[in-house]
Image (cartoon, rainbow, N blue to C red):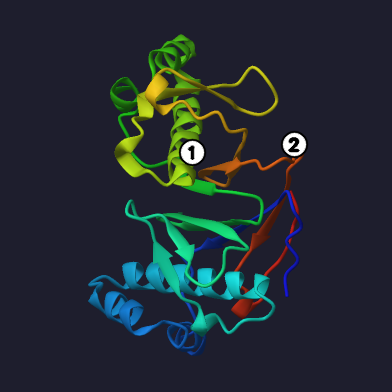
């Protein structure tokens, strides 16, 4: 059983580019339920099938480890009306998944609602155009004031934080991305709201980090604690993993 003390967040990262050994892939496939197997088999491209298989194996093996050694194949999942996933049979832990080409991320905590987002910062993206469409006026002013060589990295820092926060709230597009702003005056990112209808008076923990060519952001609702401990793991427990710390 993996220990998850109050106020701790475990972030599991898996690269999806390596070829999976056929025997290991078969073990992953054996964990899928009927619906997941149907979805898996519908993917046309091999890399899409592999990413789906890795994502489901990661979620099932990791989450089972926090549930007193539960069988990963026996876990049941549900989702709210906006698509936020949860364990159907346990409220002891909260989790969130994100993936982009090259990397999967799973964030787990027992403290409160959590969201994670991962983005490939090398991919082509019209960052200033996207910012003008989705960022708040304050965020756009700060972005425009930066030297051109720093704008791309700052864009992805804000973008991943926004995505992580919206995913943690579990309300989907009901929360306009320009209704809140992130600031970076302190050590950790801070959040302010520009739309009174969506003001969230809860206390939140935000964290952003780089991992190779990826930007990762976390958002977690705090339930009393003010200090959050983050631990990063690499790999899927079924195949062995490393814990380099954070």
Task: Assess whether mark 1 and mark 2 are in contact (beta carbons under 8 angstroms).
Answer: no
Picture residue at 51% right of the left edge, 32% below the top: 157
Point out residue 20 in the picture as x, y percentages from the top left corner. 48, 78
Quadrant of res 34: bottom left
Front-most of 122 and 226?
A: 226
Badge number at residue 226: 2
- Position of 143 compared to 208: left or right? left
Quadrant of res 66: bottom right
Point out residue 201 in the picture as x, y percentages from the top left corner. 55, 28
Picture residue at 43% right of the left edge, 84% below the top: 29
Q: Give the foreground label among 2 and 1.
A: 2
Label 2 secondary element: loop
- Position of 157 compared to 49: left or right? right
Badge number at residue 105: none
Whole-angstrom CA distance, mark 2 to mark 1, is 18 Å
Q: Is residue 168 visible?
A: yes
Picture residue at 60% right of the left edge, 75% below the top: 64
- Quickly name the residue at label 1: 165
Point out residue 209 in the picture as x, y percentages from the top left corner. 61, 40
Picture residue at 39% right of the left edge, 83% below the top: 33
Q: Is residue 236 visible?
A: no
Point out residue 18 in the picture as x, y percentages from the top left corner. 49, 69
Quadrant of res 1: bottom right
Label 1 secondary element: helix
Q: Vertically, is 141 above or below 19?
A: above
Task: Tell how many labels.
Answer: 2
Dot 2: few (<14), some (14–19), or many (≥20) neighbours within 10 Å?
few
């Amino acid at each position: 059983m993996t220990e998850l003390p109050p106020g701790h967040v475990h972030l599991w990262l898996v690269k999806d580019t390596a070829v999976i050994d056929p025997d290991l892939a078969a073990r992953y496939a054996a964990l899928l339920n009927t619906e997941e197997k149907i979805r898996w088999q519908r993917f046309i491209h091999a890399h899409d099938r592999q990413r789906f298989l890795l994502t489901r194996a990661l979620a099932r093996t990791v989450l089972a480890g926090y549930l007193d050694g539960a069988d990963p194949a026996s876990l049941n999942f549900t989702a709210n009306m906006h698509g936020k996933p949860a364990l159907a049979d346990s409220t002891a832990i909260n989790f969130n998944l994100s993936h982009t080409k090259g990397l999967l991320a799973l964030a787990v905590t027992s403290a409160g609602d959590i969201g994670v987002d991962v983005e490939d910062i090398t991919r082509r993206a019209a960052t200033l155009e996207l910012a003008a469409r989705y960022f708040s006026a304050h965020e756009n002013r700060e972005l425009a004031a930066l030297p051109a060589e720093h704008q791309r990295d700052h864009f992805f820092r804000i973008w991943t934080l926004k995505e992580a926060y919206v995913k943690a709230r579990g309300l989907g597009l009901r929360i306009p991305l320009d209704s809140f702003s992130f600031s970076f005056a302190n050590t950790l990112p801070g959040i302010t709201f520009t739309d009174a209808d969506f003001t969230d008076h809860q206390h939140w923990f935000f964290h952003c980090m780089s991992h190779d060519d990826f930007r990762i952001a976390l958002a977690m609702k705090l339930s009393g604690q003010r200090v959050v401990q983050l631990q990063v793991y690499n790999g899927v427990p079924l195949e062995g993993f490393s814990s380099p710390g954070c």
